[in-house]
Image (tube, helix red, strand yellow):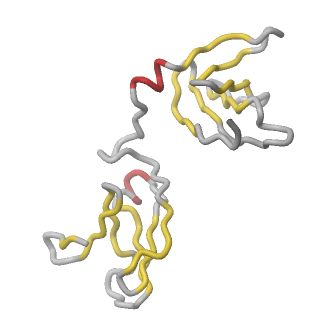
């Protein structure tokens, strides 16, 4: 916990700062929202009870510098566009394959993990605009 220049409290977790959601209230349970909530529409939150961390949602919509999340050079070098054996477009990202989702909107294209349907129901996905990647969810439910 740090003190702001105006005497308020600010919570710092994982390099991100959080503001008290209702600054005037001093209750045992406190909701903290990301400091970039209004500018980056970030929905990350932290809940404390009597000063102890009890619940977190640390999924930020921005990087630590406040801008769009950055992917390290290794990850982007590990990404390849290609076609499958059947001639369908695909992306290989690391050791995982992403197939083009059938419904696309203009230049936006959604790519889903090849195990998106079936037993594993993996929800890892990529979003591209043209050939530029704008969003990555690379958390897989399988190996």
**Farthest-out residue, left:** 5
Check the image and name the residue furthest to the front.
143
Q: Is residue 50 left or right of residue 92?
A: left
Q: Is residue 86 above or below residue 101?
A: above
In front here: 14 or 34?
14
Q: Nearer the viewer, residue 71 or 100?
A: 71
What is the tally of numbered marks visible in this picture? 0
Residue 39 vertical position relative to residue 33 in the rendered view, above or below: above
Q: Position of residue 140 (x, y in %)?
A: 65, 40
Q: Position of residue 118 (x, y in %)?
A: 86, 39
The C terminus sits in image quarter: top right
Q: Is residue 40 above or below residue 81?
A: below
Residue drawn at point x = 29 percent, y = 45 percent: 65
On-image quarter of the N terminus:
bottom left
Horizontal and vertical percent for residue 88?
A: 78, 14
On the image, the x and y values in percent for residue 78 come to 51, 20
Give residue 36's quadrant in the image: bottom left
Q: Nearer the viewer, residue 138 or 129?
A: 138
* Most foreground residue, 126 or 121: 121
Q: Is residue 114 left or right of residue 26?
A: right
Which residue corresponds to the image point at 41% horizontal and 59% vertical from the top-left? 37
Q: From the viewer's perspective, is residue 39 above or below residue 63?
A: below
Please give the name of the residue rendered at 46% of the width and 66% of the height, measured from the top-left corner: 45
Residue 87, image quadrant? top right
């Amino acid at each position: 916990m740090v003190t702001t220049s105006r005497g308020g409290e600010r919570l710092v977790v994982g390099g991100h700062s959080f503001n008290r959601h209702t600054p005037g209230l001093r209750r045992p349970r406190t909701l903290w929202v990301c400091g970039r909530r209004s500018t980056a529409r970030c929905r990350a939150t932290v809940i404390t009870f009597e000063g102890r961390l009890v619940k977190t949602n640390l999924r930020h919509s921005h990087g630590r510098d406040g801008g769009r999340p950055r992917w390290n050079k290794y990850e982007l070098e590990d990404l390849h566009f290609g076609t499958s054996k059947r001639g369908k477009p695909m992306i290989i990202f690391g050791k995982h394959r992403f197939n083009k989702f059938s419904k696309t909107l203009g230049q936006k294209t959604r790519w889903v993990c090849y195990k998106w349907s079936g037993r594993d129901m993996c929800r890892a996905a990529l979003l591209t605009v043209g050939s530029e990647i704008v969003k990555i969810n690379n958390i897989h439910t399988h190996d």
